[in-house]
Image (cartoon, helix red, strand yellow):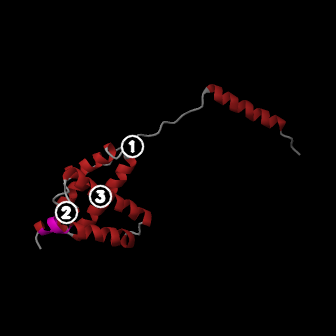
Amino acid sequence: MGLNYLMNNNFSKLLQSFLTDYIINDCGFSKNTKTSYSTSFLLLIEFLNDKHKIKPDDITFKTLTKEIITDYLGWLEEVRSTSISTRNQRLAAIKSFYKFVQKKEPTLINTCSEILTIKVKKTPKPTISYFTEKEIKILIDHLILNFNSTVYC
């Protein structure tokens, strides 16, 4: 079985094995994770069909270049208004699949390595809000008032 055969025909079989067996039985991921991973690939299939006119049966490892996956991640954010966090979860699902493929089909290691170099996007850190001086004074006054009115036995 040559590399061209694997790149052209083995994608759907490996994806099915990954989603139906590997992530639940071998990795012990939850059903929620399986659902999330499945959704990631359903969205990828939708993206490939809508934007690149690639039908599900025509998806191959040759089709899924680093540029296509990066374009997919951008599509998630821009067209589907996906948060950076969710975008990163979709990328994690894809990377997990490609790590699985590396173990199952060593002839695809170079192809997988390209996808595995895609970086997660940094999420903005939430700003910490502090009490104003006036708010602190109100809290202290409230504590003092309650402390003074408490009767101890």
Q: 85 or 35, which lies in front?
A: 35
The span shown in magenta is 5-10
Q: Would residue 83 be found to the left or right of residue 52 on screen? A: right
Which residue matches tag 2?
Answer: 109
| Sequence order check, earlier mark of 3 and 1 | 3
> Residue 91 location in percent, x, y?
32, 54
Q: Residue at x 33, y 68 (%)?
A: 19
Rounded to the nearest angstrom, the CA distance separating label 3 from label 1 is: 19 Å
Horizontally, is 46 left or right of 106 in the view? right
Horizontal side of residue 118 vs 9, given as left or right: right
Say which residue label 1 marks: 123
- What residue do we see at 69% from left, 29% from top? 138
Q: Is residue 30 visible?
A: no
Residue type at mark 3 is: Lys
| Element at label 3 | helix
Q: Is residue 90 above or below residue 99?
A: above
The type of residue carrying mark 1 is Thr
Q: Which residue is mark 3?
A: 95
Helix, strand, or loop for circle 1?
A: loop
The residue at 83%/39% (across/down) is 150
Inter-mark Cα distance, 3 to 2: 13 Å
Q: Nearer the viewer, mark 3 or mark 2?
A: 3
